Image (cartoon, rainbow, N blue to C red):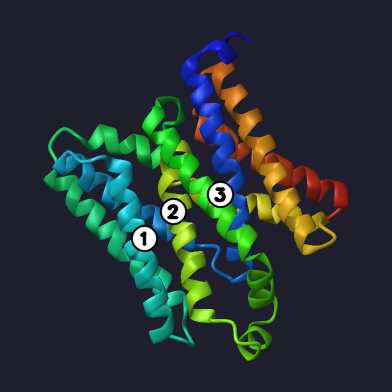
């Protein structure tokens, strides 16, 4: 295939594989925390940062990353304020992110088409700087999770036991939210803000149907994600389709296949 010899496709494949590794890794913990929708929230806030980056002529992905981190702090703060209705924090921050992004869109002149690539993904436009940012985030996420894997496992499966054992739950909750913000902010240029939560949740949904243990579910989620990235990019490259859409549809196809194989009703 000629597309494999093209530098833009090689960069896209590298970036896609890196996000395909980190997104489901974070997604497993988010699903266990019942925070599957946090991906959409942080993605919308990141878009507001991207819009501001274009407006002030500063690296858009970097500004989006800062916005996502600030939003992660705000979400954890609001979750403590609304302990009984913790999901309100997600709804509030998403509303604020959408409102701010809309305001910045109206202030900008001539940059809206650039922002659209972050809404729907533009993996073929990844440059060396983007790849380095994605790589740094990938290494950071893998390193933190590997170092604190036992603590995260205990916290998400039995938070009361984790608290009694002396784990700083507030610190670990904030760490997970911040890592999620980093992954989402760098992933929006690859699959787009409108689809980024799919990489966090659908691979996990696939793995939970057939996994035999927690570690097995993590492994399967990453495996399904990487398969979808490779298949989606190849299909998009051959038939000139939107790569973000083909990656997500590949994930959905895997999910449907697993459900049908298990004999479950859709």
Left/right of residue 214 with respect to residue 179 in the rendered view = right
Across and down, in percent, residue 20 comes to: 59, 42
Look at 37% across and 78% down and name the residue there. 77
| Residue nearest the viewer, comparing 234 with 53 | 53
Q: Nearer the viewer, mark 3 or mark 1?
A: 1
- Compared to 20, does 75 lie above or below? below
**In contact (CB < 8 Å): disc 2 and disc 1:** yes
Residue toward you, 43 or 15: 15
Query: Separation of disc 2 and disc 1 at Cα?
Result: 7 Å
Q: Nearer the viewer, residue 57 or 231?
A: 57
Residue pointed to by mark 1: 69
Q: What label sits on residue 198 in the rendered view?
A: 3
> Hey, which quadrant is residue 226 in on the image?
top right
> In the image, residue 8 lies at what x, y percent?
46, 19
Disc 3 from disc 1: Cα separation: 20 Å
Sequence-wise, the earlier of marks 3 and 2 is 2
* Residue in the image at 54% along x and 42% along y: 19
Which residue was labeled with disc 2?
182
For this rendering, which residue is in front, 109 or 30?
Answer: 30
The secondary structure type at the circle numbered 3 is helix
- Residue at image x 55%, y 35%? 16
Q: Comparing marks 3 and 2, which lies closer to the viewer?
A: 2
């Amino acid at each position: 295939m000629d597309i494999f010899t093209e530098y833009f496709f090689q960069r896209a494949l590298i970036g896609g594989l890196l996000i395909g590794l980190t997104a489901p890794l974070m997604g497993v913990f988010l699903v266990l925390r019942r925070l599957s929708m946090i991906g959409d929230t942080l993605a919308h806030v990141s878009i507001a940062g991207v819009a501001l980056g274009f407006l002030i002529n500063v690296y858009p992905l970097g500004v989006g990353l800062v916005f996502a981190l600030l939003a992660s702090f705000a979400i954890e703060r609001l979750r403590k304020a609304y302990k009984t209705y913790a999901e309100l924090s997600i709804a509030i921050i998403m509303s604020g992110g959408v409102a701010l992004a809309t305001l910045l869109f109206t202030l900008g002149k001539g940059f809206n088409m650039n922002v659209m690539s972050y809404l729907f993904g533009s993996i073929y436009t990844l440059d060396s700087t983007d790849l380095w940012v994605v790589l740094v985030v990938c290494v950071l996420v893998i390193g933190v999770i590997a170092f604190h894997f036992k603590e995260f496992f205990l916290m998400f499966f039995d938070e009361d036991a984790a608290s009694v054992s002396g784990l700083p739950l507030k610190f670990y909750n904030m760490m997970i939210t911040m890592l999620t913000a980093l992954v989402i902010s760098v992933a929006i240029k690859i699959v787009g803000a409108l689809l980024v939560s799919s990489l966090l949740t659908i691979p996990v949904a696939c793995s939970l149907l057939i996994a035999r243990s927690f570690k097995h579910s993590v492994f399967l989620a990453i495996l399904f994600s990487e398969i979808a990235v490779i298949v989606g990019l190849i299909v998009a490259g051959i038939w000139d389709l939107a790569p973000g859409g083909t990656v997500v549809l590949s994930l959905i196809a895997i999910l449907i296949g697993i459900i049908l194989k298990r004999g479950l009703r859709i």
